[in-house]
Amino acid sequence: MLTFTHKVLNVVRKIPVGKTMTYGEVAKRAGSPSAARVVGIIIKNNFLLDVPCHRVVPAGTTGKNLTVKNVGQYNRGGSEAKLKLLLAEKA
DNA sequence: TAGTTGACCGGAA
DNA sequence: ATTCCGGCCAACT
């Protein structure tokens, strides 16, 4: 029934490799521009590899500002692992 | 069942 | 420039 959760997962799943999308953008695409937090919660509770949660970064985080403090949290190996993955895919 | 928290964002003081 | 507030929806207690 395509709920917010499903939409968010679907959107994140569509993120191409080497690209990053902000929580706000995902939330916007999901149907609720201000529900960026929920996006994090959903992704956090979702452990499927189909959803590249490590490609989702907080707003203002660009390829230049990629730092442990800017990449945001990660349910797998912490911000460090997330940063590593992003750098590896972005290259 | 209801209340509180939470991987955020944008605007305001 | 920094700090505070409200908002959205799902998961946890």
Image (tube, coloured by chain):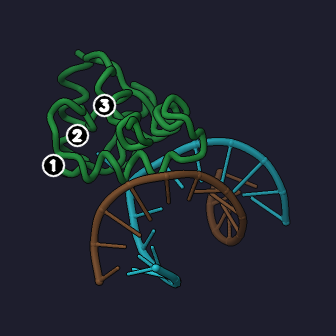
Chain colours: A green, B cyan, C brown
Residue occupying image coordinates x 23% and y 15%: A91
**What residue is shown with label 2?**
A82
The crowd level at tag 2 (other Cα within 10 Å; few <14, some 14-19, many 20+) is: many
Indicate the amino acid at tag 1: Arg
Quarter holding the N terminus of chain A is top left
The crowd level at tag 3 (other Cα within 10 Å; few <14, some 14-19, many 20+) is: many
Specify whether disc 1 shares its chain with disc 3.
yes
**What residue is shown with label 1?**
A76
> Which circle, 3 or 2, is nearer the viewer?
3
| Dot 1 or dot 3, earlier in sequence | 3
Name the chain letter of the residue that bears numbered label 1: A
- Report if the CB atoms under discs 1 and 2 are less than 8 Å apart: yes
Residue occupying image coordinates x 42% and y 45%: A39
Indicate the amino acid at tag 3: Arg
Residue nearest the viewer, comparing A29 with A82:
A29
A52, above or below B6, in the image: above
Q: Position of residue A86 (x, y in %)?
A: 25, 29
Which image quadrant for residue C2? Answer: bottom right
Numbered-mark total? 3
**What residue is shown with label 3?**
A55
| Dot 1 or dot 2, earlier in sequence | 1
| Dot 3 or dot 2, earlier in sequence | 3
